[in-house]
Image (tube, helix red, strand yellow):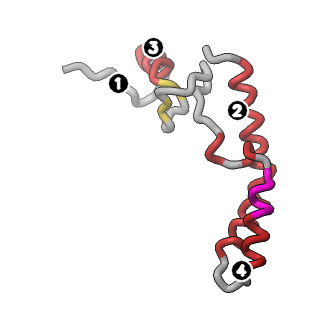
Amino acid sequence: MAKKSAIEKNKARAKMVLKYAAKRNRLKAIASDKSLGQEERFAARLKLAQLPRNSAPNRVRNRCELTGRARGYYRKFQLSRIALRELGSLGQIPGLTKSSW
């Protein structure tokens, strides 16, 4: 089980990403628009840099829904490898079968 503080910090980051998503996309569009003047684009880049760091989507970490584990994460199931193996062995994940060779 991951630390509660790490899980809560990640949840706060995810909220902040949603809060600033529209503003960030608008500023990025202005900054990459070649038809605008260089000063306008530079001003948009400066405003983009002034946004909170935790509002960037790449700062949100994928975490297991059950345990909060950050590593060994399967996107399809939103579980860590350990939780996936336990639930799969118990037969609680439809369509998942244990392979043997």
* Mark 2 element type: helix
Describe residue 40's horizontal placement relative to residue 75 as left or right.
right
The residues bearing labels 1 and 3 have C-alpha atoms spaced at a distance of 10 Å
Q: Nearer the viewer, mark 3 or mark 2?
A: 2
> Which-is-in-front pick, marks 4 and 1?
4
Callout 4 secondary element: helix
Identify the mark nearer the N-term, 1 or 3. 3
The answer to whether the residues at label 1 and label 3 have Cβ atoms under 8 Å apart is no
Question: In the image, which disc is placed on residue 97?
Answer: 1
Separation (CA) of disc 3 from disc 4: 60 Å
The region drawn magenta spans 46-51
Pointers 4 and 2 in contact (CB under 8 A)?
Answer: no
- Of labels 1 and 2, earlier in sequence is 2
Q: Position of residue 78 (x, y in %)?
A: 55, 32
In the image, which is nearer the foreground, mark 1 or mark 2? 2
Kindly check if marks 3 and 4 are in contact, taking CB atoms under 8 A apart as contact.
no
Residue 69: x and y, percent? Answer: 57, 22
Frontmost of labels 4 and 2 is 4
Tell me which amino acid carries mark 4.
Answer: Gln
Quarter holding residue 6: top right
Residue 90's label in the rendered image is 3
Query: Mark 2 packing: few (<14 Cα in 10 Å), some, or many (20+)?
Result: some
- CA distance separating discs 4 and 2: 36 Å
Residue 85: percent from left, percent from top: 43, 18
Residue 62 colored in magenta in the image: no
Which residue is labeled 2 in the image? 10
- Name the residue type under label 2: Asn
Residue in view at x 33 percent, y 21 percent: 98
Q: Tell me what residue is drawn at x 45 percent, y 28 percent.
A: 94
- At mark 3, the secondary structure is helix
Left/right placement of residue 67 relative to residue 46 reads left
